[in-house]
Amino acid sequence: MGLLSDLRVVEWGRLVSGPYCAKLLADLGADVIKVEPPAGDPCRLEPPFPGDVPHPERSGLFQYLNTSKRGITLDLETAAGRGLLHQLLAQADLLVENQPRRLARRLGLDEPQLRRRYPGLVVASVSPFGRTGPYRDFQGTDLTLWAAGGFSHLTPRFAADAAVAPLKVGGRQPEYLAGANAAAGALCALLARRALGRGQQVDVSEQESVASVLHGAVTKWSYQGQVASRVAQHMGAPNEAHLCKDGYMHLQCTEEHQWHRFVELMGTPEWSQLPVFATTHDRGENYDAFSLMVEDWSQRYTKQEILDQAAAARLPFAPLQTMAEVFQDPQVRYREAIVAVEHPEAGPVPMPGAPYKLSGEGAGSPWALRPAPRLGEHNLEVLERLGYSRADCVRLRQMGAI
Amino acid sequence: MTTEKMVLEGIRVLDLTRAWAGPLAVRLLADMGAQVIKIERPTGRGVAVVSGKQRTGGVYPGGEPGAHPWQREGIYNKFNRNRLSLAINLTAPQAVAVFKDLARVSDVVVDNFSARVMDNLGLGYKVLSAINPALIQLQMPAFGMTGPYRHYVTGGSISETFAGLSWLMGYPDRGPLASGARICDPIAGLMGCSAVLTALRHRRRSGHGQHIDLSHGEAITTFLGEAAVGYVMTGRLPERLGNRHPTYAPHNIYRCRGEDSWVTITVTTDEEWGALCQAIGQPELARDERFAEPPVRWQHQDELDSIIEAWTSQRDHHEVMHHLQRQGVIAAAVLDIKEMLEDPQLQARGFYVSVDQPGVGPLPYPGLPIKFSRGQRLRWDPCPDLGEHNRWALQDLLGYGEEEVQELELAGTIVSRPPGNLE
């Protein structure tokens, strides 16, 4: 019994944002039926693959984003396929979708049309720019959304000048962020359903999801008229990655007392007397010399050696871990943050597990991840639950609906 | 003004958080309509003005902290809107009793102290759940509540480096590069909000409260699924590819006309590739064998990028974005913050909201990145003054008598301005 086991969800999703939203609910026990077209979610064609050999049942991205769901294939271009989807929606609390608005409208599955039919349904819609506004039909990818959300202009931090091209952050964060926003919004709308007396649409834009994670840029502009930029002095040095013997360590002394402990640790207490390094401002201004001198020290040690020394001196230094190191990290292992999910086609797939842990009364074992569905794996099971017989299922298959 | 209820109306949250991740988790709940009481330290908001010398790092209107800097700091104001403020010194014994009284009548308690702090104060989950079994307690120290690193001191960038995100950013031939604004805190904050909502929904069914233990690093790792699974499946670490994609091309950021002006363009299908060739007036490229198939196109992307940049560099970045999007090519201008505030899409959706902050005046702030068709907040309350709601909390909410409140004031347990800031 999961925490959300009474929640019935239909996912009409593709790629990352919609499926991630539904995964967050499915991994907590919600009953999520993922509706894929007969050719499958295009995510099935996205790398990584075991041994780099593409296979629609082995995409690592798909395996990760679709855990704990049941999967059915429906051809929504056919009336019979749409009819089956409507039967599922009639029993659902929540629809999660990130399809192009025009496609949804053409198939009669956009929010206004669904609202008339299912007043209690919560519809969580994720799209690159939101469901309203002049850009509502513009498409996006993670690279373009970092840019449209104001993040790329600020990255990489400490660029020497504006000729340094803006840069995206690793991974597909705009899509994940929007998916997580949609999950929060959906839970909230479900909670409010009783008080408001009906369902509603939760409309999440990936552009806004990125815009909402900028830290100080808005206030720097509105309070002080400064346009934040990636071209900036090395503020608060040290506050970035420095080379060491076996990789990189992030060294950070945002407080003056930390700087004093750091020069003690390096065995160079006299540095704190040097006027060129006196304040964070001075260290930023003389960053090139500063960095060389710090790396002269840091390159003599491994990440672990520096981490141990820093922990003893209560300095917030941290290794830039590779994924290989994340898997070996003592904290990750202790807290079992990586779990292996056994998949019939891909084998046991270790993947990130719970984003947070719940341990109150009745929580049971939340986050019991089950493998992602194979294409159409639960067609019969789901249709039988809708009251169709085996013979009906054969007919539906012959009609091309499933 | 509608009388419609906001989505989270009726939920009361006690907010002990500081810095970024915690206040953001709670701000999401507050923006959605929860009533939030910020439990603030009397020493103020990290903007203490010591003997006339201002602390560095704050963002003040016109760069001036003024006489009441704790009311005027932009980052704090941004994260702490839509709240009520109770300024109380939790290390005083009477204060712990006050907090327990508040916990009795609240739904959620959130902190992002180091793992040991709440237990040391005598306010761990065992204590609080005994007082109020329906209470939901979210604790979000950087490394979580358990494990060998639980007491490590941390700064803003730390969880990102541990979780494997920082290592991913940069170019193939160089070391990792720093992101423009850390994203570990917002991810942790968003997951914290989600966790509380999950627990609230479960509570409605079961009546039980919940303890939530959130590690920032774990929250971030769940946003890196393909990198983690990819390492296992291929035995290789993901490459640092700059702005490029492991299989799609073109996929990059291109220079446009004007200073520091750029556009992003990504082609993910052959259809989009054909559309791009048309859109830049070079339909013959679609038949060029160097670019015919995705893998070949990927191999020749240096040449391709030069061709595209020769076209974009003559044009304005908005013009390029609109022209390409109209032709079915995925593109977006790289926006700075000034352009963000003027962006027609964000304006049409009302993403930035105006908050009239006392001592500052009405200014734009980022709104809630979740649009509710019903129960959306329509009025945005400013960040409260320090201790502004002391008497409301103690007298109106808890029913304390005048004498009791005066005693707490006299003892300095509750305050309405930071000590040492009297000019």
Image (tube, helix red, strand yellow):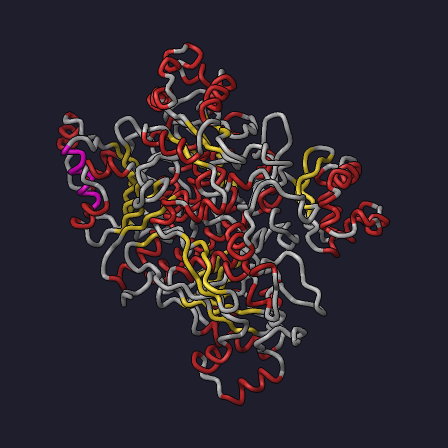
Q: Is residue B275 left or right of residue A395?
A: right
**x, y percent for residue A175:** 42, 40
Against A184, residue B304 (above or below) is: above
**x, y percent for residue B284:** 37, 13
Residue located 82% across and 51% down the image = A272
Q: Is residue B383 left or right of residue A389?
A: right
- Residue A88 located within the stretch drawn in magenta: yes
Any part of residue B295 in sight = yes
Against A148, residue A181 (above or below) is: below
Any part of residue B228 in sight = no
Against B92, residue A240 (above or below) is: above
- Of all residues, the one furthest to the top in this rendering is B289
**x, y percent for residue B201:** 35, 58
Q: Is residue A382 left or right of residue B312?
A: left
- Residue A83 located within the stretch drawn in magenta: yes
Quadrant containing the C terminus of chain A in the rendered view: top left
Q: Is residue B402 left or right of residue A380?
A: right
Q: Nearer the viewer, residue A129 or A344?
A: A129
- Of all residues, the one furthest to the right in this rendering is A270
**x, y percent for residue B273:** 37, 21
Q: Which residues are magenta?
A: A79-89
- The majority secondary structure of the magenta stretch comes to helix
- Of all residues, the one furthest to the bottom in this rendering is B403
Residue located 62% across and 36% down the image = A161
Q: Nearer the viewer, residue A268 or A286?
A: A286
Against B412, residue A134 (above or below) is: above
Residue located 32% across and 28% down the image = B327
